[in-house]
Image (tube, helix red, strand yellow):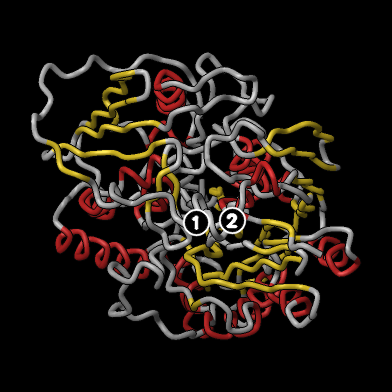
Amino acid sequence: MRTGYERRSMKGIIGAAALVVVLLLVGCGTGAEAPTETPAEATEMPGEEATPGEEETPGEEETPSAAAEREGTLRVSAFPIAQTDPKLISSDAEVLIANHAYDYLVDVGPDNQIQPRLATDWTRSEDGLTYEFQLAEGVTFHDGTPMTADDVVYTFRRLRDTEGLPTTDLYSIITDIEATGELSVSFTLSTTNPFFLYDLSDNHALVVKEGTEDATDFNGTGPFVVTDYQPGNRMVMEANENYFMEDRPQLAGLEIIFFNDQSASASALRGGQIDLTMDLSTPLYESLRERDDLVAKDIATNQFANVRIRVDQPPGDDPKVRQALKLATDREEIFQLVQQGYGAVGRDTPVGPQFQTYYTEDIPIPERDPEEAQALLEEAGYPDGLDLELILLDTLNFPDLAAVLKRQWSEAGINVEINTVPESVFYGEGRWLEVQLGIVGWGHRPYPQFYLDVMVECGAKWNATRFCDDELDQLINTAGSTLDEEERVEAYHEIQRILIERGPFIVPYFFAEYGVISDRFEGFELKAFSGRTNLANVRLVEE
């Protein structure tokens, strides 16, 4: 889900969401006993030599001391949030806030590459089962407590060991998490995972203070400190004067202003009541991008709209019905009408064209054929067609997508009642997982395995369709464990084939991500999952 995603929020879920998620967890149980032997030789991980990029540490001649120059408050629009504990966040707004109050062990840059954050460098053992991390010095929580390796250990045990959290499955291969020094920590895995560093940057994996049970006070190590929170109204965040990254943040503060409606936030930007809005629909982005006093940015992503039906109850339990839905859908028309050409046409799988190594168009998508779709419905026992309720968020382009689907599907005898709900209601108490037919936004993730692990695999936490396929699960396991790139590519291609041929969802398009900011600010670099955009880099332009 864009959960972040976890998008959109599970944009978001997800992510990722992510994306994502989703696309898109808690408890302080202890880890397994440390192994009796550790491989003696270790190899440097890709990215170990990476140093904080521009977004963390620009050159001194480019950016003067933040302590001397920090000024200005950036007013940002966001949808109201339902969750404040990092273990539970999913929407873009929740991730955006947490991303600035807390820090990740490692982060993902705008180029989808792993970057240092709390970890300054790391190594991986030759057998791929042990990871060693060195932590930054001088990091403190907002309450003044020094951060140590014990806090990192606690955080990831909390995410791994708490039943019912999405990260429980994500981190289930971690057999031991150990502080090997005051500022060093090791992770031992039960099996190899070529994407483990990306898993450590999951939206929920923000480091909390040891002993934290319900992280509702925003006591993180991040670049901004929460000083006022009025649920449903606004949140005020001030610059962390003790932040460990030199010259960050550039701003004196952030003000997150909550809007229930995208049009209202766009109007507020036009009127000067806010300075930045993201997660826009395509029409709203088009309406803002030509203004001289605004800077508009759009980037390609792997976040996608997911139209999915449950397969554990009628009518989705019949493969003929699922195939009829696919045959009744014109993805190219949807892409042009809803996305206006931004992003990419979908192919009913979460493996999108941004994953160039793993993406394939060798498996054809059946051409739209409403007459054949109607014949399949008759074979499935629905000679008079189907009446369905389609539940979706009232944000982004989803209402437009639903309207086009309603028209397209009606030509095949599929009659849809559209029910739009606010994001906080849709994701609140897991409602999105229960609806029979729904549209979910999944946020961008920098690698495809996340989606397969949390939304496709049998029994996955966010498998809202309840789809289960043994052949698919075997391929997902191979793709997520082999260190042989050729074998992994082949597995991803087969996964796409199965989902296109018999999968329970339609992916009509992949989003572009949009952001529009006042020209009074600079340094804004939009990320594919907007909630992970680093606003600590933004600075006020001298007037």
* Residue beneath the point at 71% across and 47% down: 70
Residue 313, how many percent across, how many down?
51, 49
Q: In the rendered view, does 76 fall on the left or right side of 60?
A: right
Residue 420 visible, this angle? yes
| Circle 1/circle 2 CB separation < 8 Å | yes
Answer above or below: position of 318 versus 246.
below
Which part of the image, by quadrant, shows the C terminus?
bottom right
Q: Secondary structure at mark 1?
A: loop
* Residue beneath the point at 58% across and 79% down: 342
Q: Residues within 10 Å of mark 2 (few under 14, many from 20)?
A: some
Structural distance between the alpha carbons of marks 1 and 2: 6 Å
Give the residue at mark 1.
59
Q: Residues within 10 Å of mark 1 (few under 14, many from 20)?
A: few
Residue 440, how many percent across, how many down?
59, 57
- Name the residue nearer the viewer: 318 or 470: 470
Q: In the rendered view, does 505 fall on the left or right side of 356?
A: right
Give the residue at mark 2.
63
Residue 457, how many percent across, how many down?
36, 47
* Residue beneath the point at 81% across and 32% down: 228
Answer above or below: position of 217 versus 403.
above
Q: Secondary structure at mark 2?
A: loop
* Residue beneath the point at 51% across and 70% down: 510
Answer above or below: position of 320 versus 69.
below
Question: Mark 1: which amino acid?
Answer: Gly
- Name the residue nearer the viewer: 347 or 323: 347
Q: Residue 537: which numbered mark, if any?
A: none
- Name the residue nearer the viewer: 430 or 290: 290
Question: Mark 2: which amino acid?
Answer: Thr
Residue 467 visible, this angle? no
